[in-house]
Amino acid sequence: MQVSVEQSSWSGPLPAPSDMAKYDQIVTNGAERIFSAWEDESRHRRELEKKELRWSIFEGIYGKTLAMIFVLAVLALCAYAISVGAEWFAAIVGSGMIGSIVWAFVKVNRPNKN
């Protein structure tokens, strides 16, 4: 008695090269169509990733710019309040701004504990 065992494996986003020839036998230009669809999908995925990265960069810069404008506006308001003799108002608004900035910094930079 003789037993023969054959094993093969393939890993990748596309079928094994030996299987590609079989696709050509089943469908006209089957292998070419598979490659074309894979290339289109890869191109599309890269474009989406680029758009997401650009938006992430824009969002970070935009958020920091608006935060800086807000801080400068509040500091100007505090300076004006001090100049007109409302030091109590400047102290409340200034400490509230500093507290909110510290809270936001701690909240953003704290690692998630899921």
Image: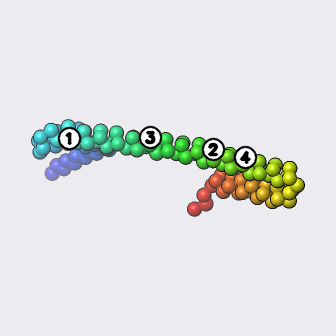
Tell me if residue 45 comes above or below residue 100 in the rendering. above
Amino acid type, mark 2: Thr
Chain-order first, disc 1 or disc 2: 1
Tell me if residue 37 comes above or below residue 106 in the rendering. above
Disc 1 crowd rating (10 Å Cα; few below 14, some 14-19, many 20+) is some
Residue where numbered disc 3 is placed: 50
Q: Of residues 91 and 86, which is closer to you in this image?
A: 86
From the viewer's perspective, is the residue at label 1 or at label 2 nearer? 2
Residue at the outermost bottom position:
114
From the viewer's perspective, is the residue at label 1 or at label 3 nearer? 3
Give coordinates of residue 83: x percent, y percent: 86, 50
Secondary structure under the numbered disc 3 in the rendered image: helix
Residue where numbered disc 4 is placed: 72
Query: Would you say the residues marked 1 and 2 are in contact, meaning their CB atoms lie under 8 Å apart?
Result: no
Secondary structure under the numbered disc 2 in the rendered image: helix
Quarter of the picture holding the C terminus: bottom right
Query: Would you say the residues marked 2 and 4 are in contact, meaning their CB atoms lie under 8 Å apart?
Result: no
Chain-order first, disc 2 or disc 4: 2
Occupied quadrant, residue 48: top left
Residue where numbered disc 2 is placed: 65
Residue where numbered disc 1 is placed: 33
Amino acid type, mark 4: Leu
Amino acid type, mark 1: Arg
Residue 88, numbered circle: none
Amino acid type, mark 3: Lys
Distance between the alpha carbons at the discs numbered 3 and 4: 33 Å
Chain-order first, disc 3 or disc 4: 3
